[in-house]
Structure formats: C-alpha cells, structure tokens
Amino acid sequence: MKNIIIKSIIWKISSMELANLTHQIITKLNQLTYEEFALGDQSHQEASKNKMQSLIENLTEHLSCAYKKRIQNEFFSYGPLEELLKDEETSEIIINDPVSIFFEKNGTLIKHTDYFLSEYTYEKFIQRLCDQTSCILNLESPFADGSFENFRISIIDKSITHHFSSVNFRRHPLTSWTFKRLIEKKWCSEVLINEFQKIISERKNFLVIGSTGSGKTSVLNSLLNLTQPTERSIIIEDTSEISLPNKASMKLLTQSNPNNIKTEINQTDLVKRSLRLRPDRIVMGEIRGSEAKDFLMALSTGHLGSFGTLHAHDPHQALIRLEMLIQMGAPNWSLSAIRRLIFLSLDMVLVVGKNASNERCFKGAYQLCSLEENGFLLEKKF
C-alpha cells in the first residue's frame, strides 16, 4: 500500500511537470509558420510530423525514456489511454473531459490516475480518433459511432455537452462468449445449461433483457453457440458485437447518413431484407425502435427460434416497452392488436442483471402463459 501511495505522489508531481512541458511544446508549435505546418500531400505531412517530433525530442531530452514516451503518446497516439487500451480486463473506458477518465474492470468503475496533459492535445486526440474510425463529428452530426481496434466507440461533440467532446470505448471480447465461460464467471449453474439448450432446440422465440452493462450481448453470443452448425442465423446490429456462430450465418449492419453521402439503412430495412435471405433464425442485437413491429411480424409468421435483446429491468417492463416500440412502427394499431401480436410471437423472456457484489448473473426465465384483459400473465420457469 505504501508503494502505491509513493508511486501516486511521484506521478502527481511528474504529471504537473509534464503538463508544463506540454504547454511549452504547444507554444512552440503555434509559432511554426503556416507553410511549415500546413496540410499538404503525404510527403509534406510526413515532413511536418518529423518537424514536430524533432521539436518534442529537443524539449524532452532531459526526461527519462518512460516520460519521453508519455509525451510522444500525448501528441501522436492515445496519451493516458495507452495502458487501458492494452489491458484486456478493462471492459469499458469513459472520457468526459481531458482530466475525467474512468474505466470499468470486473464490473467496477474506477477513476484513472492519468489524464490528458492539455485541452489542445485532447482535442487533437478526438480528431485522430475520428480520422482513424471514419467518424464525422461536427455541428450537423454531433454524434458518431464506430469501431476502433477491439472496441465499439461512441463520440459526442462538445456542442452537445457544452464542455468537452466525450468518448466511450466498449471492448469486444477477443473470443466469443460460451456458456462454459459464463459458468466459470459464476453467471449461472451448470444445471441450467440443459434448460438453455432446450429453448434453442425447441426453437422458442424469446428476448434477453437487462440494464446497461448487464451482459445481454454476451448471453446472446452464448445462445448462438448452442445452435446447429447447419442453421443459418441472420444477425442484425447497429455496431458489430455479435460473433457469427457458423459459416452458414451472416450479419447485416445498419448504415447512417450524417452528410447525405450514402443511403441510410436502419434496422427496419434490415429485418425486411433478412426475410429474403432464407433465415433459420433472425437475431436482433438490440431492439430499440420501430423495427420491433417488423421483427415481431416476422416471428408471428413462422420464423421460429428467433431472439434479440431489449433494454429493461424486468419482464413486465420489457413487454410494456415492446408495446411502445411496436406503436412507433404502427401508430394506428390498437393496444389489443399489439398485445395479440406479442403473445403470438414471443414464448419467453430471459432476464440478466447484476448481484449485490456487482457481478453479472442470470435472474430468471419467464414464459408468456396467457393474454388477459389487463396484460400478460407471466410464469417463472427457471
């Protein structure tokens, strides 16, 4: 514990020095003429980068190798995020501003001790991130989503936060989740695996529900791994997070159109398209809009064994939210017609969440038993 405190004090002192040094480098960079620093062809940009590196090397020659590297990362790479991005146990990184960086490890959110050394380098980091992920971030398009290395990223422009641009990194697992891994994590008992296998083999239609960070996508991946190698699953997502279970399956991703450059394709379009692709199962990464109507319509007309995730805390809340989402796609439908569609389409709701120790866990499987005048009657099966 004493060593950790000493290390923290050393870094605090050194980070202040590094921040002052960073300010000196920025001042020098601002003194460069436009011709020296302007964007041009690739060779010109390379020459400009070399000039920057030379300037930084001259101003950091008195530092240790570790601190030199830290300054280099600040201007050319990911600054304080370098170690977090490499650490496979870090599942999420949240950046609210240059000094407010948090990361999730083992289900716990922790404040990072390191931070960006200036507002200038933080803004440059945002620009580099947008360039590397082909994200467009401006007043017209203040939100951007994309993939970065093994992460799904979401960026919000400072015009919306009225402070600094915000970035969220969520790590994709390097290997697809299986129930064997979930059991090792004490997510559920081994006895329940037969129940999940039964749901898949009997081709039940169901939803996996839970709050943010409860592991819905991990469970979806695990359930897909229980399907047969010859079954063709069509997976529909906004951002690629679900692994294909076999070579017969395929994935369809939405396409945004922030600046009228390409055709916008939403999840409703993809559900309709999937029906022409001979699916044995249709799998929705997350149901969050009017596509709920088309997905349920597909299920009610014979596409058995299909499933998806929905953000909700409990099965009753999930069905109420599903009613509202269907109404977005069919505003003229009566509530009784919507409930009838849900009852004809869905067999079960699987609930995931977190326990008192903040660990992910399975909370129960509920069957839709009947449709009553006041709503659905649910029965907990296991």
Image: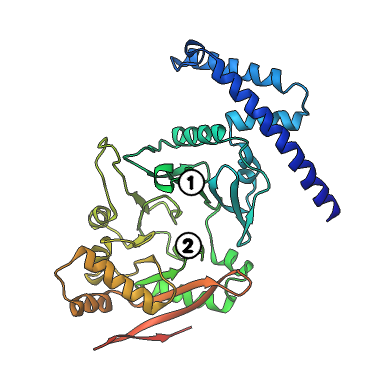
Q: Quadrant of residue 328?
A: bottom left
Q: Residues within 10 Å of mark 1 (few under 14, many from 20)?
A: many
Q: Residue at x 65, y 16 (%)?
A: 54
Q: Residues within 10 Å of mark 2 (few under 14, many from 20)?
A: many
The label on residue 319 is none
Q: Position of residue 3 (x, y in %)?
A: 84, 50
Seen from the viewer's position, the closer of residues 320 and 120 is 120
Q: Amino acid at mark 2?
A: Asn
Seen from the viewer's position, the closer of residues 308 and 282 is 308
Give the side of residue 72 with respect to residue 368, left or right: right
Q: Amino acid at mark 1?
A: Ser
Q: Position of residue 110 (x, y in %)?
A: 64, 56
Q: Residue at x 24, y 41 (%)?
A: 263
Q: Position of residue 362 (x, y in %)?
A: 53, 74
Q: CA distance from mark 2 to mark 1?
A: 35 Å
Among all residues in the image, which is located at the extreme right?
2
Tag 2 residue: 225
Q: Residue at x 64, y 29 (%)?
A: 22
Give the side of residue 239 with respect to residue 254, left or right: right
Tag 1 residue: 166
Q: Residue at x 63, y 42 (%)?
A: 115
Q: In the figure, 272 relative to 356: above or below?
A: above
